[in-house]
Amino acid sequence: MSAVTRFARVGAHSHIKGLGLKDGKALPKADGMIGQLKAREAAGIIVELIKQGKMAGRAILLAGPPGTGKTAVAIAIAKELGEDVPFIAISGSEIYSSELKKTEVLMQTMRKAIGVRIHEIRKVYEGLVTHLDIKMTRHPYNPYQQIPESARITLKTKSEERRLSVGSAIAMELIQKGIREGDVIWIDSETGKVTKVGKGEEHTGEKYDVEAETYVPTPTGPVFKEKEFVYTVTLHDLDVQVHSRSGGIFSLLFGGREEKEIPPDVRQEVDNLVKKWVDDGRAEIIPGVMFIDEASALDIEAFSFLTRAIESELAPIIILATNRGITKIRGTDIESPHGIPLDLLDRLLIITTEKYSRDEIREILRIRAEEEEIKISDEALELLTEIGEKTSLRYAVQMLTPAYIHAKKNGRKEVTPKDVEEVKRLFADVKESARYLKEHEEEMLK
């Protein structure tokens, strides 16, 4: 019998849990972050500004050489803000689409990065199903088929038992959801929507060693009650919902038709609606993080849009990242630091990142090996650290998994220096690739 293999998708920054700060000071190793002490402490101040609502009119620029942790810092900022804070990451080149205008792509991305936490009070019938009787009748168009006509259902809580008569629509939902005696359910009194919470712990039927059911306690209080439901959507979700006009807010849970372009008047309607919800205490706005990597790929039109967007009343936290020096602003002949217009640079809080030291490279490689469940010997880790110092951290990290696969193919449970040397021979780094191109320049296409 073959062993069951667990599929695990490990992202490049899945080990990041926060900024790793203590009383505003960066710890050398914490929350998956290594080094970049100055950048992380600056990011900690940014988090405080955001929490105090004092980031209006500002954005952030992460500037530094490739592989110095700019994306990691951006993700850590989002983690510090909270688990349900939206984090949307795009590359600067993604805005160039044949179907959408650049400004529309940016606008949709911005609104995907703004969350709305909605508190909805619903009147529901909730309880343990102790009796269920569904009355069937002939289908009006097919005498050989039966459909539910009505149902009588008894719901029980710890303090009350109530018998309900329901119509055909709710009876059909009871059948479709597979509701049986012993289930804990609630029925929305306005929409008739039936939700199965789980199997009641008082259920006296047969129980199995392996259960797909979730056992829940019998509800307390009256059968008919008001319940608060809290869920988070984004402004873009609401834009699509209002634009499609396919139903109420709850239909967001079941998906909707998404149009390519969303008119400004629809967004204005959504903004007014959300402001009313906030004023009424029914919702709260959660500014998320919009991270644009390779910001130098944006053109002058996109930069102008972002400059205006930063001043907007409803705007996410905008973080740009670039590894460019002084270069031309795309769409112009003007050179500027990082390829970003000066009027936008004046609005940015700039955080610089630096190359990692040898010790920091070693610790990052150790963390990535643990995250990807790779066993590596101290000698192999030291060799990879040396490679990362001479070439790049990214190249060294990329060698981890191929080296582990090579080790397993040769009957070893951990990566050895021999495995690292073999994968280094097979896969070229950037410098070796450039040298190869130089040697074969005449043979390569131009």
Image (cartoon, rainbow, N blue to C red):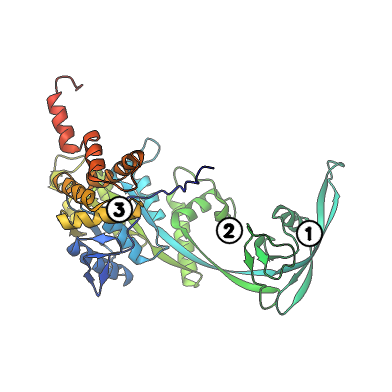
Q: Residues within 10 Å of mark 2 (few under 14, many from 20)?
A: few
Left or right, 387 with reference to 99: left
Q: Is residue 248 left or right of residue 29?
A: right
- Horizontal relation, residue 402 to residue 383: left or right: right
Instruction: Tell which of 73 and 122 is nearer to you.
Output: 73
- Three-letter amino acid code at disc 1? Gly
Identify whether 300 is placed above or below 200.
above
Crowding near the residue tagged with mark 1, few <14, some 14–19, many ≥20 C-alpha atoms within 10 Å:
some
**Residue 368 shows which numbered tag?**
3
Residue occupying the point 25% across, 75% down: 23
**Of residues 441 and 191, which is closer to you in this image?**
441
Q: Position of residue 306 (x, y in %)?
A: 28, 52
Residue at 14% from the left image edge and 23% from the top image edge? 441
Q: CA distance from mark 2 to mark 3?
A: 41 Å
Give the residue at the far top of this rendering.
443
Q: Residues within 10 Å of mark 3 (few under 14, many from 20)?
A: many
At label 2, which amino acid type do we have? Phe
Q: Amino acid at mark 3?
A: Arg
